[in-house]
Image (cartoon, rainbow, N blue to C red):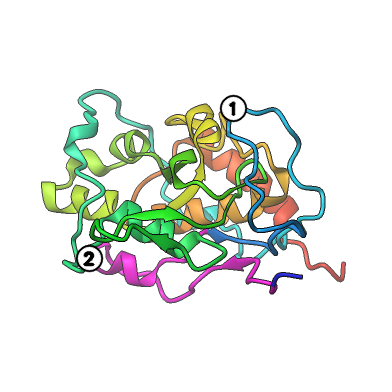
C-alpha cells in the first residue's frame, strides 16, 4: 500500500497584512491516501464520467473553524474587472519555477517528474482534485484555481489595490489549489452562495479557507455570501464527539 499522506495540509499562523499573506495563510492542499492501484494506471481524463476511486479515504470534515464573523459585510461593486489586471503564473521569488509549477509540485501526492530539459516544468505526478474527488497523473488535466476567484476579489475590494497588490494576490500559493479543469470551469467566478464543490466532504475546508483568504487580504463579503458561510459554520463547527 502506498504511504498515507496528510489529508489536509493547512499551515496555520496569525493572519497578517497582504504583504505577508503568502506566509501566513493556510494552504488548501487536500491530498488523501493514493488509491490502491498500480501507479502506472492512468486515471480517466477529466471529460470522463467514471466515478472516483472508491478506495480513496475521505479527508476530515473540519480542520479550521469556519468563522464568517471575521469578514466585513458590504455590497459588491461590479464593473471594471479585467483578468489582465491580475498578472499570474509568475516567478515572483526568482527560483525558476512559476506559480503554476510550484502549486503542481506542492500538491502532487508523489514526487513529481520534471522535464529533463525545460527549467522547472512538471510532466507527471499524482494529484487529487478535491473539488470532485478525482485523481490524475497528467498535469495537463489540471487547472490551478484561485479559490477566491479574481473577479470576486475585484468586486470585494481588490479594485482599490495597486498593481503590485493584485499581482501578489494572483500568485499567492495560499489561495491556490490544483483541481480538475471541469470542476474549475463549473465554478467560474462564483462565491459559495452559487457554487460549492460537488464533493461535499470538503465543504467545511473550502469555506474555512475562503474566509482565511478574504480576511487576510481585507476583502469583504456580501450579505448572501455571509449568510451561506454562516449556515455552513453551523454544520462544520461541531466537535466529532458531539
Q: Which mark is residue 78?
A: none
In the figure, 95 relative to 222: above or below? below
Q: Is residue 11 magenta?
A: yes
| Res. 212 in view | yes
Q: Which mark is residue 19?
A: 2
Q: CA distance from mark 2 to mark 1?
A: 38 Å
Q: Position of residue 201 (x, y in %)?
A: 72, 50
Q: Residue at x 33, y 33 (%)?
A: 151
Q: Secondary structure at mark 1?
A: loop
Q: Position of residue 125 (x, y in %)?
A: 51, 57
Image-based side of 77 in relation to 146, left or right: left
* Crowding near the residue tagged with mark 1, few <14, some 14–19, many ≥20 C-alpha atoms within 10 Å: few
Q: Which numbered disc, 2 or 1, marks the residue that appears first in the sequence?
A: 2
> What residue occupies the far right of the structure in this picture?
242
Image-based side of 215 in relation to 172, left or right: right
Q: Residue at x 64, y 71 (%)?
A: 5
The residue that label 1 is drawn on is: 47
Quadrant where the C terminus lies?
Answer: bottom right
Q: Which residues are magenta?
A: 3-28
Amino acid at each position: 500500500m502506498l504511504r498515507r499522506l496528510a489529508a489536509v495540509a493547512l499551515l496555520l499562523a496569525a493572519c497578517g497584512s497582504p504583504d505577508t499573506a503568502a506566509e501566513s495563510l493556510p494552504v488548501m492542499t487536500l491530498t488523501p491516501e493514493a488509491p490502491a492501484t498500480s501507479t502506472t494506471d492512468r486515471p480517466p481524463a477529466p471529460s470522463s464520467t467514471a466515478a472516483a476511486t472508491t478506495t480513496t479515504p475521505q479527508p476530515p470534515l473540519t480542520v479550521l473553524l469556519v468563522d464568517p464573523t471575521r469578514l466585513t459585510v458590504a455590497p459588491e461593486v461590479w464593473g471594471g474587472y479585467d483578468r489582465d489586471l491580475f498578472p499570474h503564473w509568475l516567478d515572483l521569488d526568482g527560483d525558476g519555477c512559476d506559480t503554476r509549477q510550484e502549486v503542481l509540485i506542492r500538491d502532487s501526492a508523489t514526487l513529481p517528474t520534471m522535464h529533463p530539459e525545460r527549467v522547472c516544468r512538471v510532466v507527471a505526478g499524482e494529484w487529487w482534485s478535491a473539488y470532485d474527488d478525482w485523481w490524475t497523473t497528467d498535469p495537463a488535466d489540471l487547472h490551478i484555481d484561485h479559490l477566491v476567484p479574481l473577479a470576486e476579489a475585484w468586486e470585494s475590494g481588490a479594485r482599490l489595490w495597486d498593481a503590485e497588490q493584485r499581482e501578489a494576490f494572483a500568485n499567492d500559493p495560499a489561495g491556490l489549489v490544483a483541481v480538475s479543469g471541469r470542476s474549475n470551469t463549473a465554478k467560474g467566478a462564483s462565491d459559495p452562495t452559487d457554487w460549492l464543490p460537488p464533493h461535499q466532504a470538503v465543504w467545511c475546508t473550502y469555506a474555512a479557507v475562503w474566509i482565511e483568504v478574504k480576511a487576510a487580504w481585507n476583502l469583504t463579503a456580501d450579505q448572501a455570501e455571509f449568510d451561506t458561510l454562516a449556515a455552513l459554520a453551523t454544520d462544520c463547527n461541531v466537535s466529532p464527539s458531539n
